[in-house]
Image (spheres, grey):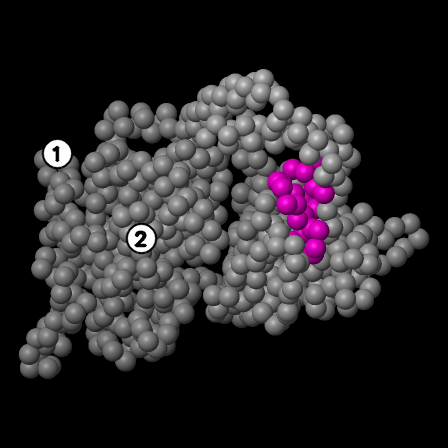
Amino acid sequence: MILKLVIHFIILVIWFIHVQVSAQDYLQVAKPGCDSKCGNLQIPFPFGMNTSECYLGKWFEIECRNTSTYQTPYLKSIGLQVTSIDVQQGTVTINNSIYRNNCGTRDSTPVNRSLEGSPFVYSQEHNKFVAAGCNIIAILQINGSEGSGCVSICDQDFKVDDIGKMELENSDCNGKSCCQNSLPPYLKEYSTEVKGLKENETDGECSYAMVVQQVGLYSYYTRKSYYFPVNGEMKDVDVVPVVLEWEIPNNLTLKLPPDNLSYCSDTNVTSSLYKRSGQRCSCKYGYSYDSNPYVEGGCSDNDDHPFYRNSPSNVPISVIKGISTSFGSIILLLILWRVFKVTKKIIMKKFREKFFKRNGGLLLQQKLSSSEVNMDKVKLFSLKELEKATDNFNSNRVLGKGGQATVYKGMLIDGTIVAVKKFKVQGKIEEFINEFVILSQINHRNVVKLLGSCLETKIPLLVYEFIPNGNLFEFLHLQNEDMPLTWNMRLRIAIEVAGALFYLHSAASQPIYHKDIKSTNILLDEKYRAKVADFGTSRMISIDVTHLTTVVQGTFGYLDPEFFQTSQFTEKSDVYSFGVVLVELLTGQKPITLLSQEEAKSLASYFIMCVEENCVFDIIDERVMKEGEKCYIMKVVNLASRCLELNGKRRPTMREITLELEAIRKLENESNAQGNGEFVRSEDYKSWDDNSIISEIMSTIDQSSRTTILNDVHIVTM
């Protein structure tokens, strides 16, 4: 142990001496004999210029275009200017054009640039879909279907010219004159479209839509933030930076350098259909900006620091000999090492305390002292434990990404499979604490279970039970023949979600409004039973409060029109969102659909129109029509239309909805039993029909004190 400490300090002394006596030598980035620069940009292999020996396949060819004053690199395969290349991260930044609408002579056609067949995709992590304009819906389309979108509104005193004067770099694009949304994964081709919230509303008003790079700012002393690296006013901007992720495709033969300083790992950057669509390589002993694992001499054989690279051997050897002959120097090094270890321990402790406070630890302690958090049901995980469970948060373990967090799949030491939620934005600590407090008090079979949290990191972590079969949106709209979504399953899922919301509204110790009910927030377990998830925007309110006033937020297509107008969220706002989910289950259609090239309508409004015109069976899913009886389907249709009433007071409560859905299922089961001559219980209901959801929840409510016996609610262990 002492010898190991001595060796470490000898290396440390060598480093300091080497800084003084050796000039910095840069690592090799391009193949020998190939040009490594175009203008001010380094061109690392597998990218290259001039001859095919200098780059790995046609997709990686860089064209260096000359002008009278400077040279500009272009990615020849797609004809766009390159501004940076990072071989370690597997990214290349390009300048991409934006889409202008109603901007007069500066109008541009919708962007539709295809990367199909290439090793590139538009990065979901580093880019956002952004739109600027007044009272518009911006849509990012993939093969004619909606892939993403956002809504931008303006105040009445906002002038049209103000959009053109806006600087994207200084805007957070939160929905006021500018909005943003995440990109779908594996995006290779897209087009943009801008429409008014109302017909002819934006005639003559200029608006913009684009995919653009979003850069994160990191600091120990300030909160994490993001900005768009676009300089100048919108009216003067023609191109914006966009990040492409890349990999070495399987059809290209890659030979690693013989120095054994780099290694490659399998990736699926460009395709979700295969576990391995390509590979990426890294340096074994760390890297710096100009490291390149793809060429000989591109990686250091010592450490990440630039002063270790290709150092002359005579200087370190002489230093080592001098230190080894001095016993006094070794003793001094040991003392210094001990001081270093103690100092490091103190610094790490300070950092953990800082992270704990910044991640809302003090607020969480207040919740604990006030008994708002049930610590018997949650655990505080260490960072080391979760890093081991998720393979250091490996990108291959990602289950899903959202605007505020990324969810990873992990396995604890005891073999338990979990989902670890890693928040992206440090400024959203309230959402982390809010979700932690709410879920720690909920114990319901149709609500995702919180297992614990970790506060030892820059970004807070939450740990949930793992739900293996994805979300309802994917299962509903990407159905396969191996596991079809039957009418019985749809009705059961609707009952389970309704029961969970009834529990949140009525049976919890304090009423809870979810505020973001949608099919992507309804997960399906191993038996395809529903689990309501994502409580980051949810709120607990006092029993005597009837509504919650907040900023307009939610998901377009599910948002209560009353909430959009008044900013007052009530339990009936959750009812409206549930109604949209119920219509999704009935029709198999997405919440937002393009009825024509000129008009975008929500599924909810289209459904209500069909009900009023008595043609609703024309849009009901074929499987539903085939398997269900029309009279019971019509009962669900009528219930859905009542949930979508524009006047919230006319909508039923979640208790009434749950009762009605259970009654429909019971009547249909009895009808089927009479038709078959005997009653055969579906396997889907075996563990659920012993007690109805209503009777189970109502048994947990003390009518006099409105308190909840949570232990009795969780009848079926998930």
Q: Is residue 45 left or right of residue 670?
A: right
Query: How far, Cα to Cα, is label 1 from label 2?
Result: 38 Å
Instruction: Point out residue 608 in the picture as x, y percentages from the top left corner.
Output: 37, 64
* Residue at 32% in and 47% down: 412
Q: What residue range appears in magenta?
A: 288-311
SS type, badge 2: strand
* Residue at 20% in and 62% down: 661
Instruction: Point out residue 8 in the picture as x, y percentages from the top left corner.
Output: 56, 31
According to the image, label 1 marks what residue? 705
Instruction: Point out residue 119 in the picture as x, y percentages from the top left corner.
Output: 62, 65
According to the image, label 2 marks what residue? 417
Closer to us: 127 or 209: 127
Location of residue 594 with respect to 290 vertically, above or below: below
Q: Main secondary structure of the magenta part?
A: loop
Q: First in sequence, mark 1 or 2: give its number.
A: 2
Closer to us: 71 or 95: 71
